[in-house]
Image (cartoon, rainbow, N blue to C red):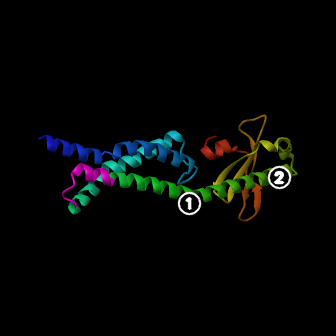
Amino acid sequence: MERVWSSRLRWRLRGAWLAPLVAVLVVVDGLLLTRLPIAGEGPDLVGGLLLAAFLNLVAVAALAPIGGLVVRTARPDLPGFVARDRVGVVLVLLLAAGLLGAGLVHREELERNHAAQADALERGRAWIGARDDRRADQFRRHVELADVVPIVDGSVYRVCVPSLRDADSAYCAVVDLDREAIRYAGAEPNAHFSTGTR
């Protein structure tokens, strides 16, 4: 009986890597999703941690048992919990590597979009500052307060100078970087435009 117990303990220790590894990788994956997002601007830290926890849970609870059964067909001497643990370790490590790879690929696109947005903001400010119409007069004096929202990431942006007198008013332009065209875009501030409220 003692021999069986020590044998099971040895297997338990060999198959006990998954829980501590998941605890560490949830934090690592959450930071990766926040610092190197795989799409868009990425979540905040809490959102990144929640998404990382969910993805790791899917890997451990849904995929590791199936993988463990496959491993057991090749290694019937391996206890089920050890097979699940080993497959789970591989899956969560692959998940972390995948998030890192996807984040690095997306980072280039994100940097291009940020550069394009800064360019659109400067062009929009210059265009509004040079406008020769009566309505633009009150906005030219504080054109440095302009903000920008993407309409199409990397190419089309909406630049607005807010009114200092009326929070529901602005002087806006659409900047199309691909066509190198700028046109008047109304008086609705970007805060209302991006949320669809008025």
Residue 90 location in percent, x, y? 37, 55
Residue at the spot 71% in from the left edge and 38% down from the top edge: 168
Q: Nearer the viewer, residue 154 or 134?
A: 154
Residue 77 falls inside the magenta stretch: yes
Neighbourhood count class around disc 2 (C-alpha, 10 Å): few under 14, some 14–19, many 20 upward? some
List the residue tagged with mark 2.
126
Few, some or many residues within 10 Å of mark 1 (<14, 14–19, 20+) = some
Residue extending farthest bottom: 179
Label 2 SS:
helix
| Quadrant containing the C terminus in the rendered view | top right
Q: Nearer the viewer, residue 141 or 197?
A: 141
Residue sitting nearer the eye, 14 or 179 = 14
Q: Residue at x 30, y 50 (%)?
A: 85
Give the residue displayed 41% in from the left and 49% down from the top. Answer: 55
- Extent of the magenta region: 75-87
Local SS, label 1? helix
- Give the x, y percent position of residue 19: 35, 43
Q: Residues at badges 2 and 1 in contact (C-beta under 8 Å)?
A: no
* Direction from residue 107 to residue 178 in the image, left or right: right
Task: Out of 150 and 46, give the one closest to the viewer.
Answer: 46
**Residue 4 at x, y = what percent?**
15, 44
Identify the residue under disc 1.
Answer: 105
> Which residue sits furthest left?
1
Residue 196 spot, x, y in % from top left: 60, 45
Q: Main secondary structure of the magenta part?
A: helix
Three-letter code for the amino acid on which mark 1 is drawn = Val
Single out the mark in the foreground, 2 or 1.
1
The disc labelled 2 sits on which kind of residue? Ala
* Apparent side of residue 37 relative to residue 93 in the rendered image (left or right): right
